[in-house]
Image (cartoon, rainbow, N blue to C red):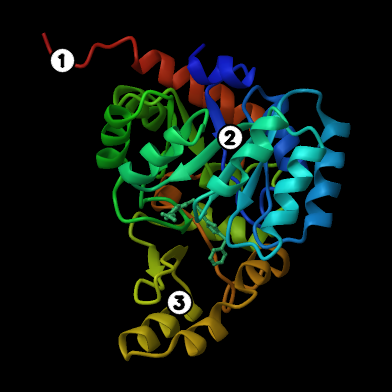
Amino acid sequence: MKTEITKLLGIEYPIIQGGMAWVAEYHLAAAVSEAGGLGIIGSGGAPASWVREQIKEVKKLTSKPFGVNLMLMNPEADEIAQVIAEEGVKVVTTGAGNPEKYMTLWKEADVKVIPVVASVALAKRMERCGADAVIAEGTESGGHIGETTTMALVPQVVDAIDIPVIAAGGIGDGRGVAAAFMLGAKAVQMGTRFVVAKESIVHSNYKQYVLKAKDIDTRVTGRTTGHPVRVIRNKQVKEYLRLEAEGATLEELEKLTLGGLRRAVVDGDMDTGSIMAGQIAGLVKEEQSCAEILKELTEQAQKLMKGNFFDE
Ligand code: TUI
């Protein structure tokens, strides 16, 4: 499955792991990279020192390419951008903002830059300032999201720019991978499927929530605050949405979600934790190793892409 993206990144399969805060640490990243995809260390809200440690650890487990995701709302984003350049990381993905101010630093350090975009406008801007590719992420995704669906966003971004496009949001199996290619993507990024990977250090309570989730079980909190976040519904989400509908202030709402992702991922607190996952959670039914996931995805996608869609 060679594409512009596999060649650009020096990987075997056009599959990239999402840069999920708290979830995308070095064990998971190394497992995805070793299996032939691109593993990613997710900075989330972590300090720069943590990111540097993670990079050193992943290098001990794999000699294959891996990337780092810089979550741009991180208070230490400037320092992390520097760490990425200093540690010789080959690929950076960014989320939740515009990474323009780091472009020169990264280009000079020979880092491939792949921003996540949720609009055509940002995709065009990223191409102009020297991005190597973009990830067009639809609203089906877990965590911090944009407005437009993957189905609508990906072809519009593909038409608007000349650099390769990676599709993300709502992709959970080989059918999703094949569909993304039909829309013009040259690779996919997946998060939720990797949350429940065997190598994922996520608390087993969290994995069970994803495995048991149905199609209609995610909710979007924070639509009124300007920070929409998709999570699996639980007690806390019900309370949040009730307060939000009543017009609660940003401070009141943030009190509920502060530290919520850590509580869910690390402590397995399913009542007050933020269980971030995409709409595809309902499709994910099994805990598998990253190697099994990549094998299944690529075999299924390749078979589908040979055609035979119509009756005689
Ligand atoms: O970044 C993500 N997903 C995330 S980040 C995250 S950490 C977090 N934790 C607690 C609360 C909130 C966040 C969890 N999930 N995905 C990439 C992404 N980027 N999705 C959408 C965007 C985006 C949206 C608007 C990127 C740029 C943008 O506009 C920037 C601009 O300046 O125009």
Asked if residue 186 is positioned above or below residue 117 in the image, the reply reads above
Q: Residue at x 41, y 73 (%)?
A: 222
In the rendered structure, which amino acid carries the disc numbered 3? Val
Alpha carbons under labels 3 and 1: distance apart? 43 Å
Q: Residue at x 58, y 48 (%)?
A: 101
Asked if residue 258 is positioned above or below residue 285 in the image, the reply reads below
Q: Can residue 222 be spotted in the picture? A: yes
Image check: 31 left or right of 7? right
Give yes or no for contact between labels 3 and 1 (Cβ–Cβ under 8 Å). no
Q: Residue at x 58, y 56 (%)?
A: 72
Between 272 and 243, the residue placed more toward the observer is 243
The residue tagged 1 is 310
Q: Secondary structure at mark 2?
A: strand
Q: Can residue 172 be spotted in the picture? A: no
In the rendered structure, which amino acid carries the disc numbered 2? Val
* Residue 129 screen position, x and y as percent: 48, 36
The residue tagged 2 is 113
* Residue 303 screen position, x and y as percent: 39, 14
Q: Nearer the viewer, mark 3 or mark 2?
A: 2
Q: Quadrant of residue 40?
A: top right
Q: Nearer the viewer, mark 2 or mark 1?
A: 2
Which numbered tag is attached to residue 237?
Answer: 3
Q: Nearer the viewer, mark 3 or mark 1?
A: 3
